[in-house]
Amino acid sequence: MKSPMRILYVFCAIIMLAGCAGGADPLAQVERSVEELYNEALDTALNGDPHDAAALFDEVERQHPYSAWATRAQLMAAWALYQSNDYGAAIVALERFIELNPAHENADYAYYLRGQVYYEQIVDVERDASMTLNAKKAFEALINRFPESQYARDAQLKIDLTQSHLAGKEMAVGRFYLAAGHYDAALRRFAKVIELYETSNQVPEALYRSFEAYLALGLDEEARRSFAVLNYNFPDSIWNQRAQHLIENPSENYAPSFFDTLFGRAASWF
């Protein structure tokens, strides 16, 4: 015959095992209405912690996967992750939404938000241009897919800014090569700016620097062409003014020996 104490131990052990089998938090398994879950997630996003809200929006989809609210919750979860600066998770969520819901009424916003996530991670384009390139591609995808979207205009503005960022990186490298006397390498960088980033604000300087490099190489015709393009397209640019001033007053900016070998030929053009 078993003692009463031994029976009590066995009974307690059974209760503990049952509790473990039921999970650490039984309340987390309680099914709730989709409206209640979604509204709680939205309130948390607006008045609490956006990162916690993302988990609640995920719960909407988990408990009600076939409801119209579930698709909306997918996008809101991505937005909440973006608001909490969890950019990596936000990109994953947005990519998933775009893949699963290509014709959704808010698909254009998903494309736009993906571009924003990349855009806000741009720190120093001269050190790492990957985020700038990703942002540019994401905004271009929005405009190509939804040209009439309400977000298209802002996306185009940001594309122009990314163009200037990328062109600025090429210009920084080109200036370095030019100062070091590596004229061919410098010209390749300036040509890239002129050809690939023609709408950026870096083009006038790229033409001016090309003008300098061609003269240094003794390529008068190419130098003349660069100056002509600069003068025609950007007559009021400071870089056109510098080119004019450099030709007319070379001694103010360069030693005579430098001018004799570099700008003496150009002065005879005018």
Image: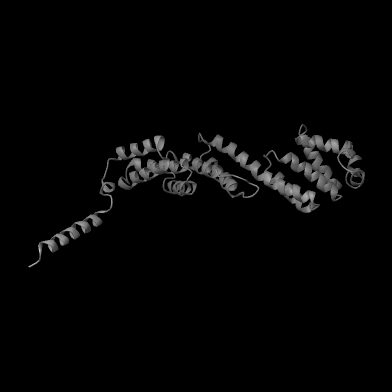
Residue 26, image x and y in percent?
Answer: 25, 49
Q: Which of the image's four quarters has the C terminus?
A: top right
Residue 15: quadrant of the picture: bottom left
Q: Is residue 31 found left or right of 129 in the rendered image?
A: left
User: Residue shown at 43%/46% (left/top)?
Assistant: 97
Q: Residue furthest top?
A: 236
For the residue pair 140 and 58, the one nearer the viewer reads as 58
The number of discs equals 0
Q: Which of the image's four quarters has the N terminus?
A: bottom left
User: Residue shown at 78%/38% (left/top)?
Assistant: 230
For the residue pair 8 and 61, the one nearer the viewer reads as 8
Q: Is residue 101 found left or right of 191 in the rendered image?
A: left
For the residue pair 65 and 39, the one nearer the viewer reads as 39
User: Residue shown at 92%/46% (left/top)?
Assistant: 257
- For the rendered model, the colour scheme is one colour
- Whether residue 196 appears in this view of the structure is no
Q: Is residue 140 found left or right of 212 in the rendered image?
A: left
Residue 203, image x and y in percent?
Answer: 72, 41
Residue 155: quadrant of the picture: top right
For the residue pair 48 and 29, the one nearer the viewer reads as 48
Residue 185, image x and y in percent?
Answer: 76, 53
- Whether residue 226 appears in this view of the structure is yes
Q: Residue furthest bottom?
A: 1
Q: Residue furthest left?
A: 1
